[in-house]
């Protein structure tokens, strides 16, 4: 979660520097919100599984792995969306 929050803060700073449009801000904030929400759901699932059993159980492991996989997929999608949003601005900034 700390890493996601740090990267979100960096993305917000760059969005301010690049003067994002309203639509770019909406997409960026929705993406950040989705990743943070997925991380919170992952934590809730992990804590619930730990509350139910401390012993190893294949279904408990599967629940944790699937939740972590959802966060990973969300983070990968966020990077792709970030590239689509930021690369044109970086390209224009380098050319100036």
Image (cartoon, grey):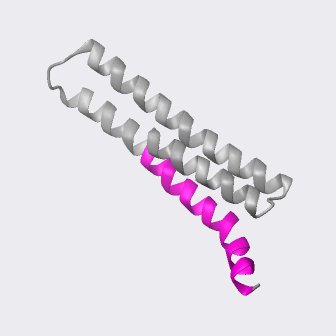
Q: Residue furthest bottom?
A: 95
Range of the magenta residues? Answer: 71-95
Q: Main secondary structure of the magenta part?
A: helix
Image point (81%, 61%), residue name: 19
User: Does the magenta segment cover residue 88?
Assistant: yes
Horizontal relation, residue 87 to residue 22: left or right? left
Q: Looking at the picture, how far across and down is residue 14, in whole percent?
A: 67, 59
User: How far across and how far down the image is residue 69, in percent?
Assistant: 39, 44
Q: Residue at x 41, y 28 (%)?
A: 43
Residue 76 part of the magenta segment: yes
Seen as rendered, the residue at the extreme left is 55
Q: Nearer the viewer, residue 80 or 18?
A: 18
In this rendered view, identify the residue nearer to me: 5 or 58. Answer: 5
* Relative horizontal placement of residue 25, taking residue 34 as reference (left or right): right
Looking at the picture, how far across and down is residue 86, in whole percent?
67, 66
| Quadrant location of the C terminus in the rendered image | bottom right
- Above-or-below relation of 54 to 24: above
Report the residue that reaches farthest toward the top. Answer: 52
Q: Quadrant of residue 47?
A: top left
Horizontal and vertical percent for residue 57?
Answer: 17, 26
The quarter of the image holding the N terminus is top left
- Residue drawn at x 22%, y 16% is 53
Q: How many marks?
A: 0
> Is 60 left or right of 57, judged from the image as shown?
right
In the displayed orientation, state which residue is furthest to the right: 22
Above/below status of 50 relative to 85: above
Residue at point 70% right, 45% down?
Answer: 29
């Amino acid at each position: 979660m700390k890493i996601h929050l740090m990267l979100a803060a960096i993305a917000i700073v760059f969005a301010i520097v690049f003067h994002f449009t309203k639509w770019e801000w909406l997409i960026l904030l929705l993406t950040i919100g989705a990743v943070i929400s997925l991380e919170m759901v992952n934590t809730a699932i992990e804590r619930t599984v730990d509350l139910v059993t401390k012993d190893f159980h294949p279904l408990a492991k599967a629940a944790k792995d699937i939740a972590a996989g959802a966060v990973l997929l969300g983070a990968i999608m966020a990077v792709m969306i970030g590239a689509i949003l930021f690369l044109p601005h970086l390209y224009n900034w380098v050319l100036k």
